[in-house]
Image (cartoon, rainbow, N blue to C red):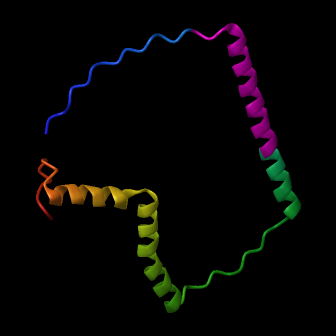
Amino acid sequence: MTAAAFPEVRRPPVPAPPPETERLLAALAEASALAERAESRAIALAFDAIGDIVLPEAVPATADDQALIRALAPLYLAAQLEEASLLTAVETLCGLAVSGSLQQDLGPLE
């Protein structure tokens, strides 16, 4: 299958923004940077107020826990593929290939 030729789209040049816009964008960038600094300091103070965090000792996973994690891994992968709409795309591609609508060689099966 060959690539379709599309006419080149020419867009008109974008005019330069007026000086007021540049000053406003600079002021907004500075305000954003100040807000980020204030947030990071607030978080640091909040963690300082909490004090030391004591974590429990790590224990090895039991055989039941390992089996549960192994069983959930394929389900998690399937959920992520479904969320990305990859399964729908593959089903559509397979349907086109089986019906003969797809004229492109899909390569060898491995």
* Quadrant holding the N terminus: top left
Q: Quadrant of residue 87?
A: bottom left
- The reply, left or right, for residue 100 in relation to residue 75 is left
Magenta segment range?
Answer: 16-39
* Quadrant holding the C terminus: bottom left
- The reply, left or right, for residue 18 in relation to residue 47 is left
Q: Residue at x 19, y 33 (%)?
A: 3
Is residue 94 magenta-colored?
no
Q: Residue at x 47, y 78 (%)?
A: 72
Q: Residue at x 58, y 9 (%)?
A: 16
- Identify which residue, 105 or 53, lies in the foreground: 105
Q: Residue at x 55, y 9 (%)?
A: 15
- The reply, left or right, for residue 85 in relation to residue 99 is right
Q: Is residue 2 above or below residue 98?
A: above
Number of numbered labels in the structure image: 0
User: x and y percent of residue 29 in the render?
Assistant: 71, 27
- Identify which residue, 82 or 65, lies in the foreground: 82
Q: Is residue 25 above or below residue 94?
A: above
- Identify which residue, 106 or 63, lies in the foreground: 106
Q: Is residue 7 above or below residue 51?
A: above
Q: State whether the magenta stretch is mostly helix, strand or loop.
A: helix
Q: Is residue 18 above or below residue 47?
A: above
User: x and y percent of residue 84 in the render?
Assistant: 43, 56
Is residue 26 magenta-colored?
yes
User: x and y percent of residue 100 in the render?
Assistant: 13, 55
User: x and y percent of residue 69 in the render?
Assistant: 49, 80
Question: Farthest residue toward the right?
Answer: 49
Q: Quadrant of residue 46?
A: bottom right
Question: Farthest residue toward the bottom?
Answer: 63
